[in-house]
Amino acid sequence: MNKSNINTHHQNIFWYILTYSGIILLFLLVGIFPLYEYDSNLIKNNIKLKNQIEEQKELAPIYLNLLKVMNNKDVRVLPNPEKTAILRGEAGKFQDDFRKIAGNAGLMIVSLTPDLSTLAGSSTSFLHNVVLKGEFANFRKMFIGLGAVPYLDRIEEISIQQNPDSMEFRMKIWIALK
């Protein structure tokens, strides 16, 4: 009889150990592991936020410069004067004005010849044939300068040719006459 009592006692201890081990395992699975995952996610998010804050600190001066530029009301405006006509006797003024504009733009004038046949009679426009040499960016600057000439009537033709040393620009420019 004593023998069966010991076996049941060992079996009860085995079941107690198994039950308590299961409870501990269940506690670990339900309580501690999810908490560990939650903490690791918080740590990852914290590191991510710290990196974003560092990026914001590094980019703040650039952002402030962009805001300053956007709020700057001194926007580049192309010249657009009131269109007028120049007196026939002052038609030579265009050559001086054009030389100054081309020089400021960094272009070299190869030739600037007026077409005297367009000046004859009661013509309201006077043609100038122009050949320039230089860089394309300077050609753009020259156009902006020409936009400020109030008696410029129109530019009829533009021809651009790439040469080994620079670009060559040919234009037909009409000025308005009174």
Image: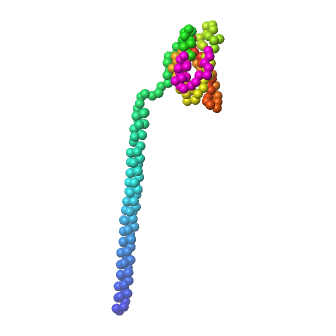
The image quarter containing residue 5 is bottom left
Q: Is residue 107 magenta?
A: yes
Quadrant including the C terminus: top right
The image quarter containing residue 66 is top left
Q: Residue at x 52, y 16 (%)?
A: 150
Identify whether 3 is placed above or below 136: below
The picture places residue 115, in percent across and down from the top left corner, at 63, 14
The picture places residue 56, in percent across and down from the top left corner, at 40, 45
Quadrant including the N terminus: bottom left
Q: Residue at x 56, y 25 (%)?
A: 107
70 or 111: which is nearer to us? Answer: 111
Magenta part of the protein: which range? 96-114
Identify whether 120 is placed above or below 66: above
Q: Residue at x 58, y 24 (%)?
A: 108
22 or 60: which is nearer to us? Answer: 60
The residue furthest bottom is: 1
Whether residue 140 is visible? no
Number of numbered tags placed on the structure image: 0
The residue furthest top is: 121
What colour scheme was applied to this rendering of the protein? rainbow
The picture places residue 147, in percent across and down from the top left corner, at 53, 21
The picture places residue 124, in percent across and down from the top left corner, at 59, 11
The image quarter containing residue 67 is top left
Identify whether 37 is placed above or below 139: below
Q: Residue at x 62, y 26 (%)?
A: 168
124 or 3: which is nearer to us? Answer: 124
Whether residue 112 is visible? yes
Q: Is residue 155 magenta?
A: no
